[in-house]
Amino acid sequence: MRAPAVFGLMLAAAVIMTTLTSLYRGTEDDLPDPGTPAVAVMPSVEAAPRVVHAEAAVAIPVEGVRAWDLVDGWSQSRAQERLHRALDIAAPVGTPVIAAMDGRIEKLLASDRGGHTIYQRSTDGRLMLYYAHLQGYRRGLAEGDRVRRGQVLATVGASGNADPAFPHLHFQMLKTTPDADWNAGEPVNPYPLLAGRTRARQ
């Protein structure tokens, strides 16, 4: 085979290898880091085009739980004809409960129904996060504290009216406004966000 033909074949092979390598690297970069917690992205409520901000990222609020572990219990019937407007995340007693997003602790409250609870307002004030049936709070946690996504807030328990045989975090998201009271808001289903069924359009 003549030298120009060999050179042409070598050049074509180099171009193909370069293209395949760049494609592989692009695919590899698109994969999530297996060491990072499962995070779903909350779509903005603004009109299109919608933009994802760092504050809008929502983490599954129980340490070690992944998206495929979640069960959508939204709108299930409860006692006294109540509808379940939250997500129950089963985990052993004492499992760390983490902040699902950045924000501020609005209220620490013990009630007959929710047991030890936490109300956390998101940084932009448009969401209230409600964590219930807790075993206890992180030492030193106080109302007014600023918290970051992934920071430990409490531990899973079965306080309040929870079945002791089913320790879990009762997690609720309420759409609200920055000036609204801590106990005001309209429930929204957190399951699609945490399970990755809803993705924001870039």
Image (spheres, rainbow, N blue to C red):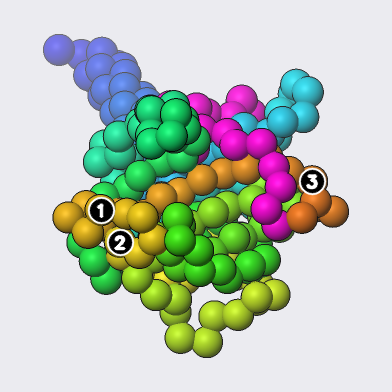
Could you say where residue 94 lies in the image, as x and y percent from the top left?
27, 71
Span shown in magenta: 182-202
The structure residue drawn at horizontal position 44% and vertical position 29%, both measured from the top left corner, is 81
Residue 31: assigned label: none
Q: Nearer the viewer, residue 92 or 3?
A: 92
Residue 163: assigned label: 1
Q: Amino acid at mark 3?
A: Thr
Tell me if residue 56 is in the magenta stretch: no
Question: Going from the N terminus, do you reach mark 2 or mark 1 first?
Answer: 2
Residue 177: assigned label: 3
Tell me the distance, in whole angstroms, between the alpha carbons under discs 3 and 1: 33 Å
The quarter of the rendered structure image containing the C terminus is top right
Residue 196 is left or right of residue 100, and the answer is left
> Which of the 4 image quadrants contains residue 43?
top right
> Which of the 4 image quadrants contains residue 194?
top left
The quarter of the rendered structure image containing the N terminus is top left
Q: Which residue is mark 2?
A: 158
Extreme-right residue of the structure = 179
Tell me the distance, in whole angstroms, between the alpha carbons under discs 3 and 2: 30 Å
Tell me if residue 192 can be seen. Answer: no
Q: Nearer the viewer, mark 3 or mark 1?
A: 1
Residue 7 against residue 129 in the figure, above or below: above
